[in-house]
Image: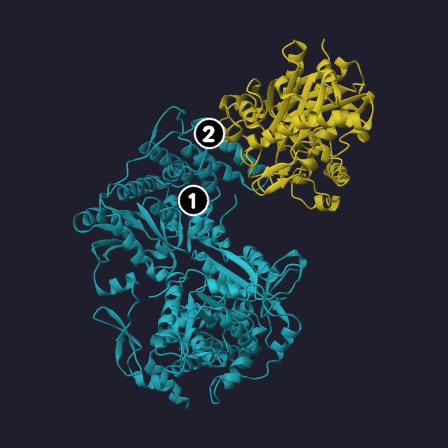
Chain colours: A yellow, B cyan
Amino acid sequence: MKSVVIAGYARSPFHPAHKGALARVRPDDLAAQVIRGLIERSGVDARDIEDLIVGCAFPEGEQGMNVARLVGLLGDLPLSVGGMTVNRFCGSSMSSIHIAMGQIQIGAGEVFICAGVESMSRVPMMGYNPLPNPALAEKMPGAYMGMGETAERVATKYQITRETQEAFAVDSQKKAAAAQAGGRLNDEIVPIQTKNGVVSEDGTVRPDTTAEGLAGLKPAFDKDGSVTAGTSSPLTDGAAAVLVTSEDYARAHGLPILARLKTVGISGLEPEVMGLGPIGASRKALERGGIDANALDVVEINEAFASQALACIHDLGLDTAKVNIDGGAIALGHPLGATGARIVGKAASLLKREGGKYALATQCIGGGQGIATLLEAAE
Amino acid sequence: MSEPICKVCVIGAGTMGAGIAAQVANAGVPVLLLDIVRDEANRNAVAEGAVAKLLKTDPAPFMSKRAAKLVETGNIDDHLDRIAECDWVIEAIVERLDLKQALYARIEAAKRPGTAVSSNTSTIPLGQLVEGRSDQFRRDFLITHFFNPPRYMRLIEVVAGPDSDPELVARVSDFADRSLGKTVVPAHDTPGFIANRVGTYWLAVAINAAMDQGLTVEEADQIGGKPMGVPKTGIFGLVDLVGIDLMPLLSKSLTSTLSQGDPYFDTVRPLPLVDRMIAEGYTGRKGKGGFYRLDRSNGGKVKQSIDLKTGEYHDSRKPASLPSGADRDLGKLLGVKGKVGEYAWTVLSHVLSYAAMLVPEAADDIVAIDDAMKLGYNWKFGPFELVDRIGAAKLVERLKAEGRTVPALLEQVGSGSFYRVEGGKRQYFGLDGAYHDIVRPDGVLMLEDIKRAGEPLAKTGSAALWDVGDGVACIEFTGKMNALDGEVMKLIQQAIPIVKDRFKALVIYNDGSHFSAGANLGLALFALNIAAYGEVQTLVVAGQQALKALKYAPFPVVAAPAGMALGGGCEIVLHADAVQAHAETYIGLVETGVGLIPGWGGNGEMIDRWQQSGQLPKGPMPAVAKVFETVSTATVSKSAAEAKELMFLRAKDGITMNRSRLLADAKAKALSLVDGYTPPAPPEFKLPGASGRLALRMAAEGFHKRGIATDYDLVVSDSLAEVLTGGEADLVDTVKEADLLKLEVKGFMTRVRDSRTVARIEQMLETGKPLRN
């Protein structure tokens, strides 16, 4: 099979929904700017791009229609480049990468931009017209269960105390703050033009987070529960994109290869514990790659909630020193449709930066799924 | 009148200055708020800090977020020249003559001739303020004394000096009246003007007497509060509220400016207890406590009172009830033997005599004094109205018997009264010994004046229909709290043919503090306790029919709410063609608080206006979800401006700042709709049905899990959701207004039959607080 690589990664700064600096930026404009930035930085010839695949969890309103095509037009991509919108909730843009990988391997193109976008300020979670099916709700109440409640279930099932979750959250904030302060996030961020000036830094990170401060928060989803706003990823506005090409193309055109896409995995489970999704999906990807979790040098696991991330780290037997080295979604934010592209791009970048052979990017998905991508060093 | 006031500058961003700036902004007028430079890094920090504080203050000084944006901040060193942009400069800095004079010199250099300059001083005579200023400045200068908090207190005392330009004083007064919503009371340039002069004397007399006569603070406030028409804070509670540390300051200011021989001097004496309280930080509610405090030790909240003799706190004790009638009838109160009657007499005889002495010294007539006390101290009756309630002759007789001085005005009124009604007009007793009509300012129309002069066109047990002139009729609610019941609905049905035949338009209005607190719950509870469900359903249906009859009547209907318009009161407003609301309108569909859902057509009206608003995304859910959010949480607007955001009022609805102008404005609005009026067409709805109901239930369950919604809240909100989503409606169906009304009745009656609803109604009636079952 053709070898497929990540040849570029870029994202917008991430900002808290409603109050953040990107709240007044349309998601399609946001994504278009990130894609322009990615093309310019990678040096890829835009005429070679086969398709623009954009993930979005609530594709309506300003991120509705076929937003991928509209983003391509906004971003001045050549008219010959296609556009497809993908929805797998939080796994949307990771799926866009998997699709591109498959397309390249069946000989349906050499160059793809795989992106994701979500404005949680401008399009509410559940969308504008939530119309759940009463019959399904009766048959399987978990199908529509709120994410916070699933996080509580995972915390209960794995007996993860509030203190443990808070320690994890403080750690995530510290790692992100250190990365931000050390300028280690600068390379991946495309400054975004807004009506109020250029935004070039993340607005989500809270460097002054302490365990004592978090301990004072009220439970966010269940008055008797353990999950708080401080141990959940915040509602976030953001976009991310990776350049996916055949290895042959990247080498022929001198593109900076970050990592090779090795295997992928998708796995479903009970919706009520959707946060455990990465376990099954990662095991599939690892098994398909023929490696063991302890062979991983870099892991990016999406921190939808501290409880589910901790449960997955435990079951997969991950080395915490290798997990979310520059902080995770609790600190950086989780713009649903954009996160998959961010963590695959980040895992590939980290593999290159930190050295090592294998990297894993994985995340849970509302409704009861997990998705995983295994990367290997391309040298 | 020349040059309207289009921009205002307030100098001094303390509590009063900032509050005044907020009220100017509430009127939609841009305002520049300046203060001194205290911080070189941010030279506007003082004014900016004041605005930040305003935004956090409760009750809110701003009526809307939009209003807050109209306040621009600055400092007097860099921005004083910008008063050239302003038509009125209000000075509200500290009460120091030297600082005020120095500021005026700078203002004089920067202002345009003809720009009004006023001081919010409460103590410094006007003559001293303008010393050293030019003739032009003196012409442009006056005192405008606001009361705290400026948004909520209706009084403004306006003092013109001998050189003040009458046209300019009229221009400022008109702006204060129409735009700021204040009642302008012209006062003379005498110490403390009117309200604080009487008020300070009153508090001093009442505190001294309580100490002399051995009353507890609870007893003094029981006697000196409600029976005298004083807010329930009473005397000591009021001092706690305004700050005990203000007492010596006010006293010092008055004693340094009042003429010798003023009775106020007799009240001045050392008060070691008060001195000690101030020294130890017991300055009232803003400090560690005052005459009352809340003891929060042991995790509780226990109200305590200070012992006026020992200065020790003890748990507050409710005094024995006053003898029957003494809480309403001043004659009876004064006749009570022992310390109750004695204390009441001491306070009333001194305060009423003092007030009588102040005409013409402090005001031209008794009306100004009564208005000042009613609007500046929230007294229900002014001093002269209190005299009338006792009887001037009785008062004089007892004063003479005690060998006390009788003010000339009391002597003069003799066996008569200070107010009377003659030829349907209310008149007051003048210094010339004659009665004069109380003339309302232009554009002020009160229903009480119309009622005094005539008979209603129709009347039922709870409502009446009046001719308010110019071809406009007015429905008035007359029940307790203006509660709504079958009698109101009957009157509405009676009114429609009368208005159709003999009038051009209808307004729904009353003079009360509150438009209507909603349906008569007491009546509802009575019916439910005897399981008279049929009667309840009949009333619900009758209400729907009456309100829809109003909506589709062949003439324009304008609702004119002020104060609370809750539940059914809100639904009446929702059915009017247009609304003219007082700025202080608190409106909402609060039925869920008592376990019910709106039953008089409010649900459909709210969905329709959100759907028509063009503010929401397309599809069947957004409007329904908005209404669900607002109604299931019983959200009440904190102003008319906020009511527009919540869609209880529409963008085109009018807002009147001055309560006294509401009826006239509503009438004008109704008449403006007459030409070419056609009743609205009934709305049709596309509703989401069972799927939408499930989505709303899931949202409510989230709140339940978080402990925000109670068990029964879930049940009630599901009943609401069933109506709002159209019951069994399918997305492709069209739901007619009549269908939605049927669903409303069904949902309402289901809730009415639930004992948990009855429990909620019971608690609301008993305690005024919602039961969270």
Judge whether A80 appears above or below A213 on screen: above
Label 1: chain?
A: B
Residue closer to the observer: B372 or B166: B166
What residue did someone put label 2 on? B692
Report the side of B639 relative to A330 (left or right): left
Residue closer to the observer: A136 or B445: B445
Depth-wise, is mark 2 or mark 1 nearer the camera? 2
Question: Tag on residue B591?
Answer: 1
Residue A371 % position (x, y): 68, 21
Label 2: chain?
A: B
Question: Tag on residue B544?
Answer: none
Report the side of B487 relative to A51 (left or right): left
Q: Which residue is drawn at the image coordinates 55% and 79% (left, top)?
A: B211
Query: Badge 1, how many Cα within 10 Å: few under 14, some, many 20+?
Result: many
Asked whether residue B21 appears in the rendered view, the answer is yes
Secondary element type, mark 1? helix
Please, what is the three-letter code of the amino acid marked with disc 2? Gly
Residue B110 % position (x, y): 50, 69
Determine which quarter of the picture holds residue B552: top left
Q: CA distance from mark 2 to mark 1?
A: 21 Å
Determine which quarter of the picture holds residue A174: top right
Residue B190 % position (x, y): 44, 81
In the picture, which quadrant includes the N terminus of chain B? bottom left
Query: Badge 2, how many Cα within 10 Å: few under 14, some, many 20+?
Result: many
Asked whether residue A20 appears in the rendered view, the answer is no
